[in-house]
Image (tube, rainbow, N blue to C red):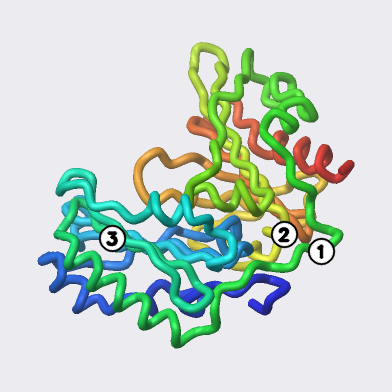
Amino acid sequence: MNSRGGVVAFGGDCANALDLGVLSASVGLDMVLYEPAWRSGAEGLQGGLTCTWTDSERLHRSTVTLITYPASIVSAEMSDAASICDGVRFGCSFAGVVGDVWVTLGVFPSSGEAVTRTLWEEAAQRVTVFPAAERATPTPAWWAPVTCEQLSRRVDLVPTTGWQSVTLSSQPDGGTVYTLPESVGGVARCVYSGTSGSMSQNMTIRIIPGGGAYFDAIVATPEARSVTVENASRAVDVLDDALWEGHFATTVATDGTNLIVVGVTFPEVNDPRTGVAAAVLAALAGG
């Protein structure tokens, strides 16, 4: 994408970040790139990219994670916290700035500080081949940032879901590289717990200002199915974008500019996804 839509390191392709042969030899296992089914734009619109490699049998015998962002949005405290080697159990990671790009790489469990630094240096060399990461330029059509508490006040989720109870159970605290889209990009990720009959439910609502730029790529993912959501220009049901366990049934909707993602654990029991998406779209359209 151009600067208005954000520029992501490595040309936006994790395959450009590390050589699989070098990676596999370094950790002593056959490693493969493990990609999410789709990306919401939460990171990409901030110029961010997260890449994950794991052993070919996906048994978590080794996991390598690489994260890049424009250096201008990563504080010194975040960078320092991302550079730590704390024994085999907790892994080893290294972070630093290459030109205008901040790069951190971690190996879990640790294969040693020397291995981590070698892999980081390879990624650091490769990142210079591509345009530097750059944040997107917000337009007037982007939603204003909203907190989970504000969202809960704007949308009465009990009648909207049809559940007996809905409680905000967690939201990102901010202050770490993993929550940069929330702390600097106006993204909200709200997790709710509730009850539907005798069933306990969990629901996530993600709000990505400007994320509509990623909708065409989401539609193109396997098993995406168009659905109707009031107040949306387009919407789909998709496999969720989680890499590991805890998958949610997921609906993604856009107003043409922004993106909302609603996921629930048990959609077969009083599925509220399209209704919640419509209500959130209406609330945010009002400013």
Within 10 Å of disc 2 (Cα), the crowding (few <14, some 14-19, many 20+) is many
Q: In the rendered image, is residue 39 in sight?
A: yes
Taking the spot 89% from the left edge, 41% from the top edge, the residue there is: 286
Q: Are marks 1 and 2 in contact (CB under 8 Å)?
A: yes
- Looking at the image, the residue that sits furthest to the left is 28
Q: Nearer the viewer, residue 178 or 219?
A: 178
Q: Which mark is residue 188?
A: none
Q: Nearer the viewer, residue 57 or 239?
A: 57
Q: State the separation of the CA atoms marked 3 and 1.
A: 35 Å
Q: Which mark is residue 210?
A: 2
Task: Indicate the amino acid at tag 2.
Answer: Gly
Mark 2, secondary structure of its residue: loop
Task: Indicate the amino acid at tag 3.
Answer: Val
Q: State the separation of the CA atoms marked 3 and 2.
A: 29 Å
Instruction: Indicate the position of residue 186 as horizontal and vertical percent values.
Output: 68, 49
Name which of mark 3 and mark 1 comes first in the sequence.
3
Could you tell whether 184 is left or right of 98 in the image? right
Name which of mark 3 and mark 2 comes first in the sequence.
3
Taking the spot 55% from the left edge, 68% from the top edge, the residue there is: 70
Within 10 Å of disc 3 (Cα), the crowding (few <14, some 14-19, many 20+) is many
Q: State the separation of the CA atoms marked 1 and 2.
A: 8 Å
Task: Indicate the amino acid at tag 1.
Answer: Thr
- The residue tagged 1 is 139
Mark 3, secondary structure of its residue: strand
In the picture, which quadrant includes the C terminus? top right
Q: Nearer the viewer, residue 30 or 181?
A: 181
